[in-house]
């Protein structure tokens, strides 16, 4: 429901208002979606979840499932509960910050990374561009266990600067946290402020995303679903503390992970993306629409890059629908989503996808790594959730 709908409904009788809400709420039958998600809890693929289905105008369905943990008296998940978004941070924070800097002509996407981070040179890295980082075709290795050798943000960055290339730049796509960490560092160097402060001031606050934050304050940590019982490094159950080790070493703020949020806030962001960058700033006077990004920029960043000389499903920062032919797992967005889509997943069990052709947003958040990351049941559940949602809205 748009803000205009709310204002108009203030003049309608309470009975008609309730009738409108009821029709809107039960316009689709999501019972099969509920069954898939609830079965996931029963089979202990995750203890808790949030699902939100919407379009560019309104929320079509929103429901919370399960509890924070499998304990008998664990608190139930509500619409206000928050999740560790993990790698969904890459698109909502790092990629969006890069988009803003590019739109404001602070950076050029084809510039070498070394222009903004002079330390990132040598050993074949001089020609790596911002585009290469966004497409995950930089040549950098997929992952480094920074927590074993690093104790600070500078340690992590210096380790990346000292890396040899793992493969030739632009020869293939290898998803890597290192690329997103560097994107976050570029944002900080160009803007002159930390990534979390930049995103809060320029993305989260203007959109009214009140439940989205890096490094959650102590008073809200109890409202965040726990992730893993970390027995190999931190020696404690993680709740309100970033699960990703690299982001943790960096103080909780990184381009690759670190955001905490809920489905309602993520929907606000995705609705803006689906509506060509248009949103209504809750802090501005009146109801004048504003634009976070221009439509051409959103199309540039969310469209699959082709003619690269290698197989690719990546857009700039975002992922699109992979063909799934060379994977032993089902594609996370499901087989029924249109080819014209963009989205991202997170290691903790989070995902967000937008089917542009259907004008459909699907946000599915879980804490599948509780109590251990060895639990991979989400791999079959997530695509089935997306398929069932699309079937429900297509009937």
Image (cartoon, rainbow, N blue to C red):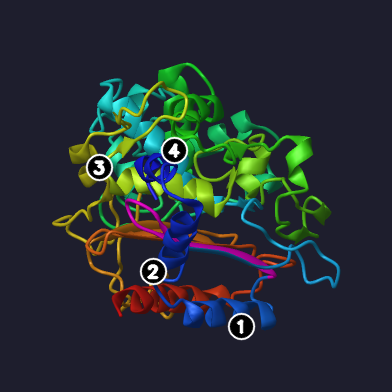
Residue 29 visible at all: yes
Label at residue 39: 1
Q: Quadrant of residue 146?
A: top right
Are the two marked residues, 3 and 1, in contact with CB atoms closer than 8 angstroms? no
Q: Is residue 343 magenta?
A: no
Secondary structure state at the residue bearing disc 1: helix
Q: Residue furthest top?
A: 192
| Among the two numbered marks 1 and 2 on one chain, the one whose residue lies closer to the N terminus | 1
Mark 4 neighbour density, 10 Å: few (under 14) some (14–19) many (20 or more): many
Q: Residue at x 48, y 48 (%)?
A: 266
Tell me how far mark 1 sits from mark 4, CA to CA. Answer: 34 Å
Q: Secondary structure at mark 4?
A: helix
From the viewer's perspective, is the residue at label 1 or at label 2 nearer? 1
Q: Secondary structure at mark 3?
A: loop
- Tell me, yes or no, whether the two marked residues, 1 and 2, touch with CB atoms within 8 Å: no
**Residue behind mark 3:** 276
- Range of magenta residues: 47-60
Write down the residue under mark 4. Answer: 94
Q: Which residue is mark 2?
A: 333
366 to the left or right of 134: right
Real-space Cα distance between discs 3 and 1?
36 Å
Give whichever of discs 3 and 2 has the lower sequence position. Answer: 3
Crowding at dot 2, Cα within 10 Å, few <14 / some 14-19 / many 20+, comes out as many
């Amino acid at each position: 429901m748009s803000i205009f709908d709310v204002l108009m409904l203030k003049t309608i009788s309470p009975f008609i208002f309730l009738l409108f809400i009821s029709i809107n709420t039960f316009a689709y039958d999501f019972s099969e979606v509920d069954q898939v998600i609830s079965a996931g809890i029963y089979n202990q693929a995750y203890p808790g979840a949030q699902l939100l289905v919407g379009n560019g105008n309104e929320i079509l369905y929103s429901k919370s499932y399960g509890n924070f943990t499998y304990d008998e008296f664990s608190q139930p998940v509500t619409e206000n509960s928050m999740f560790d978004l993990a790698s969904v941070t890459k698109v909502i924070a790092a990629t969006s910050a890069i988009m803003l800097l590019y739109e404001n002509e602070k950076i050029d996407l084809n510039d070498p990374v070394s222009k903004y981070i002079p330390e990132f040179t040598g050993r074949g890295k001089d020609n790596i561009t911002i585009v290469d980082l966004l497409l995950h075709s930089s040549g950098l290795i997929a992952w480094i266990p920074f927590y074993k050798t690093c104790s600070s943000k500078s340690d992590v960055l210096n380790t990346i600067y000292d890396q040899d290339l793992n493969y030739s730049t632009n020869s293939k796509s290898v998803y890597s946290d290192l690329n997103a960490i560097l994107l976050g560092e570029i944002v900080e160097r160009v803007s002159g402020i930390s990534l979390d402060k930049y995103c809060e001031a320029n993305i989260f606050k203007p959109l009214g995303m009140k439940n989205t934050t890096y490094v959650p304050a102590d008073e809200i940590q109890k409202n965040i679903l726990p992730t893993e019982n970390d027995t190999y490094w931190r020696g404690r159950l993680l709740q309100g503390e970033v699960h990703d080790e690299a982001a943790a070493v960096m103080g909780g703020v990184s381009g690759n992970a670190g955001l905490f949020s809920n489905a309602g806030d993520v929907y606000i962001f995705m609705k803006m993306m689906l509506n060509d960058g248009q949103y209504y700033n809750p802090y501005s006077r009146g109801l004048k629409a504003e634009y976070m990004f221009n439509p051409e920029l959103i199309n540039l960043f969310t469209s699959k890059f082709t003619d690269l000389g290698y197989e690719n499903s990546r857009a700039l920062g975002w992922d699109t629908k992979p063909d799934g032919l060379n994977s032993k797992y089902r594609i996370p967005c499901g087989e029924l989503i249109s080819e014209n889509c963009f989205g991202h997943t997170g290691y903790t069990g989070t995902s967000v996808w937008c089917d542009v052709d259907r004008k459909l947003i699907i946000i599915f958040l879980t804490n599948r790594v509780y109590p251990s990351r060895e639990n991979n049941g989400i791999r079959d559940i997530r695509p089935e959730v997306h398929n069932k949602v699309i079937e429900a809205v297509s009937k």
